[in-house]
Amino acid sequence: MGFFDKIKAKVTSVFEAVGFDKLVSGLEKTRAAFVNRLQKVLGGGRKIDAQLLDEVEEILITSDIGVTTSAKIIENVKATVKKERFENAEQIYDLIKQEILAIFAKAQQQWTPLDYNLTGKSKPYSMLIVGVNGVGKTTTIGKLSNNFKNHGKKVIIGAADTFRAAANEQLEVWAERAGVDIVSQHQGADPAAVAFDTMNAALARDTDVVIIDTAGRLHNKTHLMTELEKIGRVMKKNRADAPNEVLLVLDATTGQNALQQAREFTKVAPLTGLILTKLDGTAKGGIVIAITDELQLPVRFIGVGEKIDDLQLFDPVAYVEALFEQPEKADS
Amino acid sequence: MFESLQSRLEQALKKMRGQAKITEENIEEAIKEIRTAFLDADVNFAVVKKFIEDIKAKAVGMEVKGNLLPGQLVVKVVYDELVELMGAQKSELLYARSGPTIILVAGLQGSGKTTFCGKLSVYLKKKGRQPLLVAADIYRPAAIEQLKVLGQQANVPVFTVENANPRQIASDSLQYARKYNRDVIIVDTAGRLTIDEEMMNEVEDISKLLNPVETLFVCDAMTGQDAVNTAKAFHERLNLTGVVLTKLDGDTRGGAALSIRTVVGKPIKFVGIGEKIDALELFHPERIASRILGMGDILTLVEKAQSEIDEKEAAKLEEKIRKNEFNLQDFLEQLKVIKRMGSLKDLLGMIPGMDSAMRNVQIDDKAFSKVEAIIFSMTKEERSNPKIINGGRRRRIALGSGSSIQDVNRLLKQFEDMQKMMKMMTKGNMASKMRNFKMPTGFRR
């Protein structure tokens, strides 16, 4: 199990990383509840049996991981238990963690890493941010711009949400806070035109990062999805490789419908990754595990608060650890 | 697309064939299916558990009789129970006996509070009220601006105080409402997490200060397992009087509705069904029940069709179908309407029973273009009377539309099948007939 040894080593380093405390405290409630229940199930020197596995499955489902993926995880765990002749209930705990990490790792392997340094990435590096209504796209873009700016990158935002009342104003406030450029038009303007203008401005101004905000759209609305397709197409006019990233923003409170969202969005704007927001609440966002498993998409960033620096690079190990960590370890 | 619970139940109840009663044993498999369907629909785990027990208690001992299959019987029990659970209480908006009616709107970030407030003000105006919108979200950038824009669209005044805290804004709004004779005050609060003690205190203070008649919890219909925790936390602080379910125009099954209803025990009063300012509806328990069960949403389909099809046209069409005069020209026009309504697969998914019938059918909307091209290449006479289309005509049509004779043949055959189906449909019991109807092969890929 060389892979898991590597992961263990990584856990240690992640614990020391600055962002982890915040994630831990952000996920405090979540984790406490989860761990308490896991301990109840797994503690007391229980033997591994069908009932125990049922109880573990219940915990996974209540994290929004979904029936199918939960069942799959349990199946794999069962197989390992049989193969390795595990008997102690507490070993299940590690096995579940490893199963989930394996899902993340498999998807992540297929993509080049993305961080704020943009090493080896094309310039300008263009990102299209998409999602249904109210998941936190605009807020995420504000934080994202801020982070890139702090890494010495020149950022330009395109306000292509020309639909929602005061979306422009909201994004302008964020642009000002982050101190980055913004391209916007009046409400009701063609969002594809805004995206086009932003790409042009980026090329003219020697910009490192382009971030295009889009209006929230439900994935079953054909005309809105067609509009999104057009935005992606228009971005290519001056840069054939644009958009370099199409990131789907998912609200951690969302349940099984998020899977449907990912499936539909990727049809019109081929996704390159996910952003999971609102992880500072009581919701667990477990659906990203199902999405990652099915669509092989990497989770790129997570939102853990409302402040401008509350957006972190996603670290699967940190995420899973924060979900499963024993409370006393987190305190130390 | 989700498989319909009914077809899964029929599968699960196969061993019941020939047995006249539902027993603890023969319902076991079906119970498992119900559980999965509910969990897939995002109904909270604990709520599902309790619900399943109730269903079991009700169903065991029931006799299978008449035309009902065991699966249908069980679905009926589940459906009835769901409707009862969600609609037992009347869900109209309450008004104050004297003085202005205060409505406090609260919820998580991004659940759609501000949009709902705008819609509610329009709804109240239509009811002859004089609403006032109060912008008390000082945190999210441009939230106040957003409400102002919505107020403008609705032609409803928006009250706020620059550089004031939400408590201040709320209490000042009372005086403003009295002075300008506004009889309903809608207070839009900032989105907040239930674990944010400070913010929860704030909204609790506002509530105590205003003593609202209605405290509405706005919840995104796509919410997962956490809906229960959130609703409970808000209810403990604010003593909710009702729930608003937003973004129901998406394709979520909306299990959160059942979870919240069970945990909080308060009615769902409104549902948000679109981004337009009048896209607000009173809550219909039957609809959400079918949705959760994956039984399709025939009412939504009907409404969607209604918005696209002219009443008179529809009556004419119905007449034609009844007299068996439906021809290829009519078919062409129907195709246009369907195209306007959105993806065919989505539409079909709303029809009960179709969901499972279509399970393995891949529908390509582009297939329509081919069908259209073929019909376009026909003469008027051929369209109204396809029977005259002989070999020579077929060759010409194929050439003209850039397709093969086989394609033309297939379309004509499909059309014939369709006419047969229409004949059956006019005799009623659409869903069961539909199941026997083979989907035109041209729509397969």
Image (cartoon, rainbow, N blue to C red):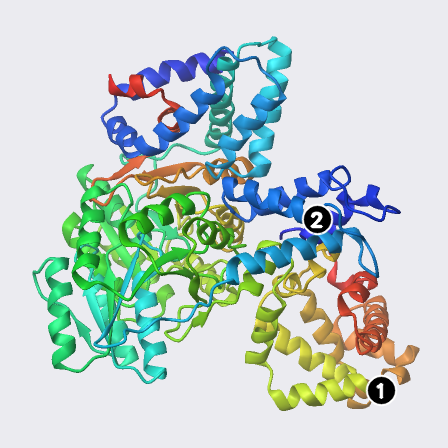
Left or right of B306 in this view: A127: left
Q: Circle 2 sits on which residue? A: B59
Which quadrant of the structure image shows residue B65? bottom right
Mark 1 vs mark 2, CA separation in Å:
53 Å
Could one spot residue B52 in this view of the protein? yes
Quarter placement of the C terminus of chain B:
bottom right
Residue B213, above or below B207: below
* Residue A220 visible within the image: no
What amino acid does circle 1 point to? Answer: Asn
The residue that appears at 63% across and 68% down in the rendered structure is B298
Is A244 on the left-hand or right-hand side of B11?
A: left
Q: Tell me the mark number nearer the camera, choosing from 1 and 2.
A: 2
User: Residue B171, image x and y in percent?
Assistant: 12, 65
Is B118 positioned to the left or the right of B74 in the image?
A: left
- A227 and B391: which is toward the camera: A227
Q: Which residue is mark 1?
A: B385
